[in-house]
Image: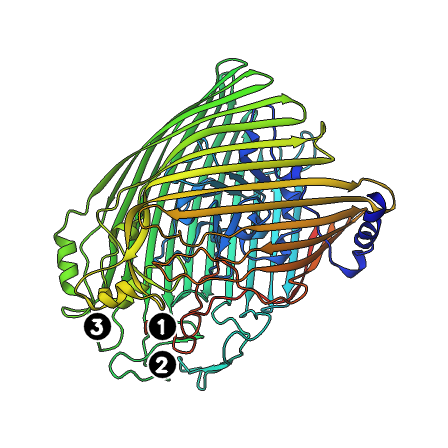
Amino acid sequence: MKSRLKPLVALLAACPWYGFAAEIPMLEEIVVSAARPQYPPLGVSSLGEAALAPLRASTSDAASLLRDIPGVSLYGAGGVSSLPSMHGLADDRLRIKVDGMDLISACANHMNSPLSYIDPANVGSVKVVAGLTPVSVAGDSIGASIAVTSAAPEFARSGTTPLLKGQAGVFYRSNGDAYGGNLSATIAGEKLSMTYNGATAQAGNYKAAKDFKAADVVPAIRAQDKVGHALAGDEVASSHYKSINHALGFALRHEHHLAELKLGLQDIPYQAWPNQRMDMTGNDSTQINLRYAGEYDWGALEARVYNEKTRHKMQFGEDKWYWYPTNNTLPNTATTPGMPMDTEGDNTGARMVADLALSGRDLVRVGGEFQRYRLKDWWEASGTGGMAPDTFWNINNGERDRLGLFAEWEARWNPAWFTLLGARGERVDMNTGTVQGYNATSFYPAEAAAFNASDRAKTDHNLDLTVLARHTPDATRTFEFGYARKTRSPNLYERYAWSTGGMAMRMVNWAGDGNGYVGNLDLKPEVAHTLSAAADWHDDARERWGVKVSPYFTYVDDYIDARRCASANANCNAANQTATSGFVYLQFVNQSARLYGVDISGNYTLADSGPYGRVIATGMVSYTRGENRTSGDNLYNIMPLNAKLTVGNKLGAWSNTLEWLLVQGKEDVSQVRNELKTSGYGLLNLRGSYEWKQVRLDFGVENLLNKYYVHPLGGAYTGQGQTMSGTAVTVPWGVSVPGMGRSLYAGLNVKF
């Protein structure tokens, strides 16, 4: 066997000067262990600096840093705003924290997703809790919990001069002409630390590996754009973006106590969407985040309070245009107002949790949290036709407040057995003000009147439970199994989006399927029942080999899915009920769902010394099946069977990785949404890095063979044309968003 491996090992060892290397993600970089972890390690995947550093140069999207975690996939979205999905559950069904803040997407298209508020350069660690999530890290979600944090504050050592350090970096990616940079600086004494982090990234439209549509010329839509611009057949329109992030952190420590204040500022002047009918034309966010952590004789205490304000705007970007409402002519002057859409979000939260060490065996964790969220979503009048003269109120002073209390008990009965029991209760109060259309005749004013006359105040009483056991019979085996009950209340758009007007429905869509959605005042919270297990086999030192298998089964009562809307209104007519192709109109409804699958991951050390350095092979396989038990349909956006195989070596300052990604064709699609099927594919990636003193160079080639493919979760292509006409005029229904063609990248970081 060793003789057959030598050619591959030699090839990888020879790769450094080709620039196709990166540190291979080790299994030990993914699995967390500690003397007393907050939750059992088999349910946790964690990425630290060593695993994150090789990934940053290849992406400007913080969510994509999760791509090497088993079971994680990504919904297609804007260039810095993809939505993580795990075990078939995504977006609001996951609990996603950024530096401890529960951020909420203040947009009917969920364009400002939580992970879009932090640049990859500022991510210090990633932690994903899948399967049986403890109640202390869950709440208002039915899937995994994801925590992304910036680097921990640093202090000068006792008796030394103040700590002065920093880092500056730049990157470039060939496909889309993406470039940007980052800068961080720290000044710290023994007790006080101050850190600044800044990053910017921008890119043009990326290109697929081949033409997937006809070339087109986009008409002028602004006064300064007199003749429009061309879109090549392989160009994925509306995939360009620009993002600017600043963060300032202060930390004060005294003995076993730490206080942190983090201030954040984001400016996204534009981010276009290839699977939405509108683009982001502005997203400004300010964040204030105060945290305390302390250790006492009886245990530990952590408290946090934060506020995040978002001002979000949507409009047609340069690859989309709109026909003027009064005469259906294409715009070519600045007098065409387009469709301005504005959102304001105000999110305030507080959390306190205490760890009570009752004995060497027992740890009790108790805590509570509160979140107050306010949302305004309005569309100013446009032109002189049906979208005037009034302001359209989609969500008027929406309110969503959560109050939760939890308690859990960890017990280490002996070296072989660990158990965790937890319970969490939450109250969710929701309400919204009265609404209106653009005028007294358009967008079905009777719907607005009925909505305004309804009882819009809703209160949900939710319960979460977790029962988990872990058995470690010896140093080479660990087994975990248990049950979790988790609950999520609807978001404001699911309950309160009120109009079945075509444009209004097409604006309520975070699925990327091109369809239109309307809310439902009668929605109940989702309740998920999950049975999960995990088995981990490895060598004594966890260094040479390891295999982990994690099956799961989830049944969801009152799952919020969709059905074709039915009413006398034009968009919800009989044809909408029976259409088997094209874009359709849907209403959120409670149904029942079942999801099940398995994640398999492993690593094996092929060589650990000698002329080839350390050579490790890793792999992971994920399978998920999602079914609507009420309708018999398939759930939407379920990732098909997929696998990732990597072989990498580290020799001195060089690291090299050869990665092969395999995805099965997607046949089990959601018929109610007319979801598009996709073909299977395989991609080859080569990555590399070189570290010398204070300098780090990362480089590589994504999609080395320039393979054309469509990502199963990429959505329907609506990136160009008259996107608000019901169908994209220049690109008919049935075209999916293609993946990126070959892209070379390089990133340089210098520490000082």
Q: Please state which of residues 562 and 143 is positioned toward the viewer in this rendering.
A: 562
Q: Residue furthest right?
A: 611
The image position of residue 656, as x and y in percent, is 75, 52
**Could you give the CA–CA distance between mark 2 and mark 1, rounded to whole angstroms?**
24 Å
Quadrant assignment, res 27? top right
Q: Residue furthest front?
A: 632
Marks 3 and 2: which is nearer the front? 3
Whether residue 752 appears in this view of the structure is: no
Provide the residue designation for mark 2: 334
The amino acid pointed to by label 2 is: Ala
Provide the residue designation for mark 3: 388
Q: Earlier in the sequence, mark 3 or mark 1?
A: 3
The amino acid pointed to by label 1 is: Thr
**Could you give the CA–CA distance between mark 3 and mark 1, rounded to whole angstroms?**
23 Å
Q: Earlier in the sequence, mark 3 or mark 2?
A: 2
Q: Is residue 17 left or right of residue 548?
A: right
The amino acid pointed to by label 3 is: Ala
Could you say whether the residue bearing mark 3 is in a helix, strand or loop? Answer: loop
Could you say whether the residue bearing mark 2 is in a helix, strand or loop? Answer: loop
Q: Please state which of residues 257 and 172 is positioned toward the viewer in this rendering.
A: 172
Could you say whether the residue bearing mark 1 is in a helix, strand or loop? Answer: loop
Whether residue 19 appears in this view of the structure is: yes
User: How is the rendered protein coloured?
Assistant: rainbow
Q: The N terminus lies in which quarter of the figure?
A: top right
Provide the residue designation for mark 1: 727
Q: Please state which of residues 258 and 102 is positioned toward the viewer in this rendering.
A: 102
Residue at 31%, 50% in the rendered image: 631
- CB atoms at circles 3 and 2 under 8 Å apart? no
Work out whether 29 lies above or below 33: below
Marks 2 and 1: which is nearer the front? 1
Residue at 79%, 53% in the rendered image: 12
The image position of residue 103, as x and y in percent, is 41, 46
